[in-house]
Amino acid sequence: MFDALHAGGARICFANPGTTEMTMVTALARHGGIRPVLSLFEGVCTGAADGYARVSGQVPLTLLHLGPGFANGIANLHNARRAGSRIVNIIGDHATWHLPYDAPLTSDIESLASPVSRKVIRMAEPAAIARDVATAFAATRAAEGGAATLIVPTDVIDAREETQDAASGGATPATWQGARVDDAAVAAAAAALEGDQGVIVLLGGNALTEVGVRAGAALAARLGGRLLMEPYPGIVDLGGDLPAVERQAYFPTT
């Protein structure tokens, strides 16, 4: 599993594990390619992962203990969803055969994770681990970004090594290029520029870097318009000699 996560681009894991995740903790330590960071509260894990994703543009991991542990970190994952932060959550779960006994920490993890995840994947067989990881990374690259969640039962992760599903392949490096603008939107923008409407250059998402702000300011100056950014950006470079960027009003009327 960690080989596949590393192949997908993960280099750091913010962890608050319990006994259910001990096999994964051991594997993470032996792997060596993904840095484990122990956090003493699940909210620290998810908050740190959100910040790391925003600043670095990379995909961090969280490792959390069952549904209740994951629930302790949901507030920051809500913020991460709003910011489009690309995160892969790993949640340990009881063995599949143990779930019917309704142990004290048994919970409906899918229902907890779905509102803050682009996709929730429950691992079901060791041979499909690489495919499941690749699916998780693909979900973080969809649309505006966001988190994916892997639920890992102990009997799946503790099983003897098996040949990976040949159809699954490995996880591909998770480089997100942002949302593409279709030709119709470009044509509509060109038509608007030919009219008498005031020109506004609006920046958002991963365009609010230093390079993006400077390019946006140059474009606005060339067109004789205003430079604005979305109301609640995930992260934006400001200050110093960077051009000033107005913040778009919340619920703008024009």
Image (tube, rainbow, N blue to C red):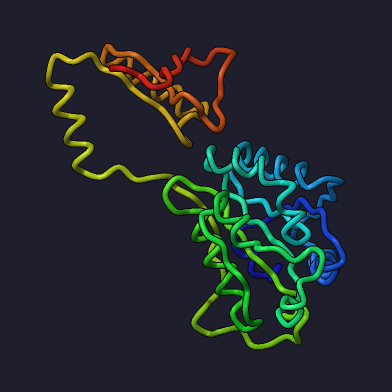
Q: Identify which residue is drawn at 53% across, 38% down.
A: 82
Whether 6 is drawn above or below 220: the answer is below
Q: Identify which residue is drawn at 29% across, 13% down.
A: 225
Q: Nearer the viewer, residue 103 or 178?
A: 103
Q: Nearer the viewer, residue 171 or 69?
A: 69
Q: Identify which residue is drawn at 72% across, 59% down.
A: 67
Q: Identify which residue is drawn at 73% across, 52% down.
A: 12
Residue 178 horizontal/vertical position (percent): 43, 45
**Quadrant where the image shows the N terminus:** bottom right
- Answer with the quarter of the image where residue 32 lies: bottom right
**Quadrant where the image shows the C terminus:** top left
Q: How many marks?
A: 0
Residue 252 horizontal/vertical position (percent): 35, 19
In this view of the protein, can residue 89 be seen by the observer? yes
In this view of the protein, can residue 30 be seen by the observer? no
Q: Nearer the viewer, residue 241 or 10?
A: 10
Residue 143 horizontal/vertical position (percent): 42, 49
- Answer with the quarter of the image where residue 133 lies: bottom right
Query: In this rendering, would 101 be left or right of 224?
Result: right
Residue 14 horizontal/vertical position (percent): 76, 50
Query: In this rendering, would 124 be left or right of 157?
Result: left
Whether 189 is drawn above or below 155: the answer is above
Whether 181 is drawn above or below 162: the answer is above
